[in-house]
Image: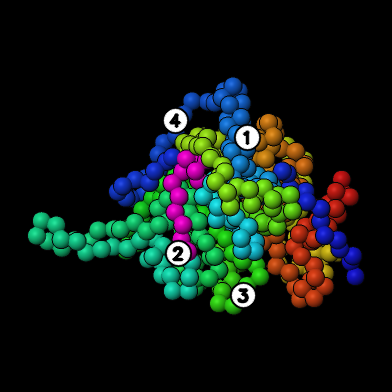
């Protein structure tokens, strides 16, 4: 049997929605090329965002970095951790620092899809009755889906179109969501009673799954100092929605060397036990491997990580770093893995070691 070890921590440290909705239109992008000086200012602002968020969120540097990577990569995030670790406060702080509109949806078993997307109301105007669309809380730049696994699958599915297409369709009318748009969902890993686990197809829509760990004693002391006293930190807006969209355009143009691209794709292929390239650990413990969306997630976030590090090229270390949050929710383990206590992160670590040994 393959000996597995727990992987080391390899993870590196306003726009306002419109008052009226309208059918979806595709704007023409005619922005001039971005110069080197402007790119440098973008990097400085993103680093300033990270420092500003860290004023209010203590001891979660890795989590903050990964959330920013997902936002810059135009992706949705699943935050998993026990209660009380500041997941909700993190999302609120991020929206404030990025100067984006924020909406929180508390998912419960009785929540209906219309409670999320909105619904048509009958209103009387000029002596006649008309339907008018009333926007739901999904119409915000950053939407916090709190305890998403407590809602029924029908309500969970109401997020799918919004997460993928950035639109909402109600009664054959499609409405555009404010851009940039992203869903940051939370779930509790230790409580299963009264919950509805997210299906694999919906998990795949999340760019990253981020595990929120417990702080150290020294970090916990700082948390006490700023939460149970009057010395609460004040955070300021640093970035704006249009600037985030501009950064995304820069990242799309970032070149990737063929060797780095092949390395990344080989990691995704190595998660599939049915393929000849799969290592022994994959054949033993994985039932289904990652989808092509995993490769997209790794490439996008690797570009963002390189950009935040002040580089305009993707390195092998960028791929290794983002592999964990990009793959851990896309690997379906078998019963043998569960019985042996093998986690997805342990499998990813072994796959990376196997691939590095081939270089």
Q: CA distance from mark 1 to mark 2?
A: 34 Å
Q: Which residue is mark 2?
A: 158
Q: Report whether residue 143 is seen.
A: yes
Q: Which residue is mark 4?
A: 30
Image position, residue 146 (x, y; %): 52, 61
Front of the two marks 1 and 4: 1
Image position, residue 275 (x, y; %): 77, 62
Residue at x 44%, y 30% (from the top left corner): 30
Q: Secondary structure at mark 3?
A: loop
Give the quarter of the figure containing the N terminus: bottom right
Q: Which residue is mark 3?
A: 192
Q: Secondary structure at mark 2?
A: helix
Q: Check disc 2: other Cα within 10 Å, few if <14, some if 14-19, many if 20+.
A: some
Q: Which residue is mark 1?
A: 47
Q: CA distance from mark 3 to mark 1?
A: 37 Å
Point out the stretch of residues depicted in magenta: 95-106
Q: Earlier in the sequence, mark 3 or mark 2?
A: 2
């Amino acid at each position: 049997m393959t000996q597995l070890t727990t992987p080391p921590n390899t993870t590196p440290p306003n726009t306002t929605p419109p008052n009226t909705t309208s059918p979806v239109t595709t704007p023409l992008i005619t922005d001039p090329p971005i110069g080197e000086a402007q790119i440098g200012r973008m990097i400085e602002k993103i680093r300033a965002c990270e420092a500003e968020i860290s004023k209010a969120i203590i001891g979660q540097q890795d989590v903050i970095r990964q959330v920013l990577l997902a936002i810059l990569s135009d992706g949705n995030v699943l935050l998993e951790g026990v209660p009380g670790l500041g997941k909700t406060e993190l999302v609120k702080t991020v929206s404030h620092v990025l100067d984006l509109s924020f909406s929180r949806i508390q998912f419960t078993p009785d929540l209906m899809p219309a409670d999320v997307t909105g619904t048509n109301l009958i209103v009387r105007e000029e002596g006649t009755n008309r339907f008018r669309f009333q926007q739901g809380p999904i119409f915000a730049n950053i939407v916090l889906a709190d305890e998403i696994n407590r809602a029924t699958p029908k309500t969970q599915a109401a997020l799918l179109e919004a997460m993928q297409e950035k639109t909402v369709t109600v009664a054959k009318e499609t409405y555009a969501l404010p851009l940039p748009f992203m869903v940051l969902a939370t779930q509790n890993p230790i409580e299963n009673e009264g919950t509805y686990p997210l299906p694999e197809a919906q998990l795949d829509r999340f760019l990253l799954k981020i595990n929120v760990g417990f702080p150290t004693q020294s970090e916990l002391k700082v948390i006490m100092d700023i939460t149970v006293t009057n010395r609460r930190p004040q955070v300021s807006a640093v970035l704006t929605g249009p600037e985030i969209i501009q950064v995304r355009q820069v990242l799309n143009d970032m070149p990737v060397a063929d060797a780095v691209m092949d390395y990344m794709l080989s990691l995704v292929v190595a998660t599939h036990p049915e393929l000849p390239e799969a290592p022994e650990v994959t054949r033993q413990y994985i039932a289904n491997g990652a989808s092509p969306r995993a490769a997209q997630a790794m490439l996008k976030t690797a570009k963002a990580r390189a950009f935040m590090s002040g580089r305009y090229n993707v390195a092998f270390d960028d791929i290794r770093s983002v592999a964990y949050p990009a793959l851990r929710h896309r690997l379906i383990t078998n019963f043998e893995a569960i019985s042996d206590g093998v986690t997805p992160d342990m499998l990813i670590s072994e796959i990376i070691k196997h691939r590095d040994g081939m270089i």
